[in-house]
Image (spheres, helix red, strand yellow):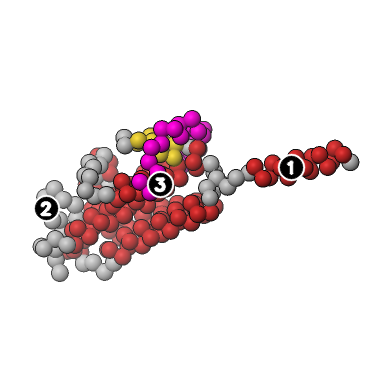
Amino acid sequence: MKKLIFMASAILMLSFLVVDPISKKERKDALKLLKDTEQGVKDQVKGLTEAQLKFKPGPDRWSIEECVKHIAKSEEMLWQMMDSVMKGAATPDKRSEIKLTDEQLIQRIEDRSTKVKTMEKLKPENIPLKNTEEALASFTKDREKLIEYVKSTESDLRNHTVAFPFGTIDSYQMILFIAAHSNRHTQQIMEVKADPNYPK
């Protein structure tokens, strides 16, 4: 009997040590950012004509359609990267290398005053998506997959890290990165629409 009571007590104590891998607030914040930035992309392209989608403000600038293709392909690639990181071993020893808070990371990615050259395979001309419609469908599929993941995951997101050229982030921050990245290019779409020569 004493042994049973001891075991029950031990299980009860351990249950208090089991911590949600991310807090309720973190889960809620990530889901809101993912949903808001998904809707942001869709709102900006809704009802646009072919001429508006393909208009380029300059020879070295992207059209709205090219922005959407880049968003879609980046979403796929970043999701695959995160999935691969989560399937690997946790790296809690790398947490000391993380220098950006969640808020700082979002601000950094969304800040278009700092220009960044994308890799070759993420340039619109190298993306095998036929048009805006196909790109939006791809983006929606991957974003919904990520939203479902965030809703249900019990994985240790904070102790799986990934190194980027700008520094190391954890997998929870990777989710914020993905959302902020789509917003970065939603802003780019808005810049295209603000051009004086944009078709009306």
Residue type for callout 1: Ile
Helix, strand or loop under label 2: loop
Q: Residues within 10 Å of mark 2 (few under 14, many from 20)?
A: few
Q: Residues within 10 Å of mark 1 (few under 14, many from 20)?
A: few
Q: Is residue 102 magenta?
A: yes
Residue type for callout 2: Gly
77 is higher (above) or lower (below) than 88: below
Q: Which mark is residue 102?
A: 3
Quarter in which the N terminus is drawn: top right
- Main SS type for the magenta part? helix
Q: Residue at x 53, y 41 (%)?
A: 156
Helix, strand or loop under label 1: helix
- The residue range painted magenta reads 83-104
Q: Which mark is residue 11?
A: 1
Q: Position of residue 73 (x, y in %)?
A: 32, 48
168 is higher (above) or lower (below) than 172: above
Question: Which residue in the protein does label 2 denote?
Answer: 58
Q: Earlier in the sequence, mark 3 or mark 2?
A: 2
Answer left or right for 198 relative to 133.
left
Q: Earlier in the sequence, mark 2 or mark 1?
A: 1
Helix, strand or loop under label 3: helix
